[in-house]
Amino acid sequence: MPATILHIGTPRTGTTVIQKHLLPKCRRSFIVSKRAYSSSGNIRDNQKPLIGYTTKEEIRQSLQANKPEEINSTKHFINNIMTPLVQISRGERDKEVEHLICLAVKQLIQVANNNNLLLSSERICDCSASLRGDSQHTQSDEEFLVHALSRVCTKANGQTPLISICFREAISYLRSKYIRTAILRHQGKLKKISPKEYIQKQATLESDHPGTSALTPAMHAEFIKQLQQHAFVKAFGFQELLASDDVFSLMGLPGEDKYAFRDFPRENKLPFTKEQEQAIEIEITEALKQYGFYDQIMKAQMFE
């Protein structure tokens, strides 16, 4: 039976390049990916650039209105799967929403027509609190969306999904994630936070709710163990990705044509100088030591 593959980032590991330039070249799998530089959620308020919501009635109407061959796969993925995942990514899950998302995944499996189905979005590797840089859960989701999506995919076709995940050296990952979060907070008119405040907030979140902070993907070995509770995992390092001559195989998609990551144009460059990035990394490292996570992160690191 064809597999369901979840490409989840981690954030800041070349996902925009992969989504924009590599995945359209896939020939042996059915690809459903967020569009580069667009939201993974159904945003209803442009002043608040976080994932929005889709009502149960809207999902029902969407599922009933479309025949499989008429589905706009990306829109279907965002409206009927990604956005409502927020409502079931918590301890008390809405069973009806979970059932509707399962039906939406089944429709994509039908559209895939006996090919592997790959779903790609780095938003799956976050929750609202880690995305915003908050210290507590104030939105519907209280876990990374990947866990709920893995459970749903298993129910949809009776098979455990494969997670394709790229890990980056911890400090450079947290620096890049902080900068992206700072930009997001500015767009959302949220209070500006320093690198030290960012790490403090994420350390609080990780201590109170383990596995739900931006620090989680920095602890490679521990995060892989979490993901393996619901899925098979194909993990690789960011440096492996940059050096690869066959990115599809590296991601767990054998049989495709060979493409080197370095042959694609660079995307999503952040507006900071090397000196600014180095200063941020120093502040992040000092904050990790101050708030007790530096040694844990270094011990769990597997990839560069």
Image (cartoon, rainbow, N blue to C red):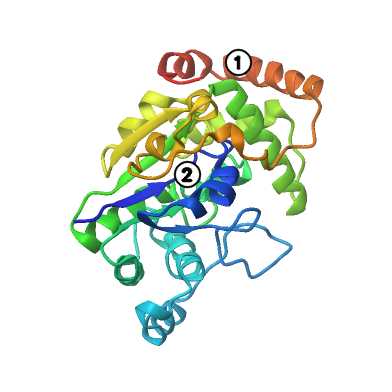
Name the foreground residue: 210 vs 264: 264
Image check: 251 left or right of 276? Answer: left
Q: Position of residue 278 (x, y in %)?
A: 74, 18
Query: What amino acid is labelled 2 in the image?
Result: Cys
Q: Position of residue 66 (x, y in %)?
A: 40, 83
- Quadrant for residue 131, please give it: top right
As drawn, the residue found furthest toward the front would be 257
- Residue 209 visible in the snapshot: no
Q: How many marks?
A: 2
- Quadrant for residue 285, please give it: top right
Q: Which mark is residue 22?
A: none
Frontmost of labels 1 and 2 is: 2
- Quadrant for residue 302, please give it: top left
* Tag 1 near tag 2, CB within 8 Å: no
Residue at the image position 46 percent from the left and 36 percent from the top? 247
Q: Secondary structure at mark 2?
A: helix
Residue at the image position 34 percent from the left and 49 percent from the top? 5
Q: Secondary structure at mark 1?
A: helix
Label 1, label 2: how far apart the Cα atoms are? 26 Å
- Residue 83 visible in the snapshot: yes
Location of mark 2 (residue): 125
Query: What amino acid is labelled 1 in the image?
Result: Gln
Graded by Cα atoms within 10 Å as few (under 14), some (14 to 19) or many (20 or more), the crowding at tag 1 reads few
Q: Position of residue 175 (x, y in %)?
A: 65, 28
Q: Position of residue 64 (x, y in %)?
A: 37, 85
Location of mark 1 (residue): 290
Residue at the image position 63 percent from the left and 58 percent from the top? 38
Q: Is residue 155 above or below residue 273?
A: below
Graded by Cα atoms within 10 Å as few (under 14), some (14 to 19) or many (20 or more), the crowding at tag 2 reads many
Q: Earlier in the sequence, mark 1 or mark 2?
A: 2
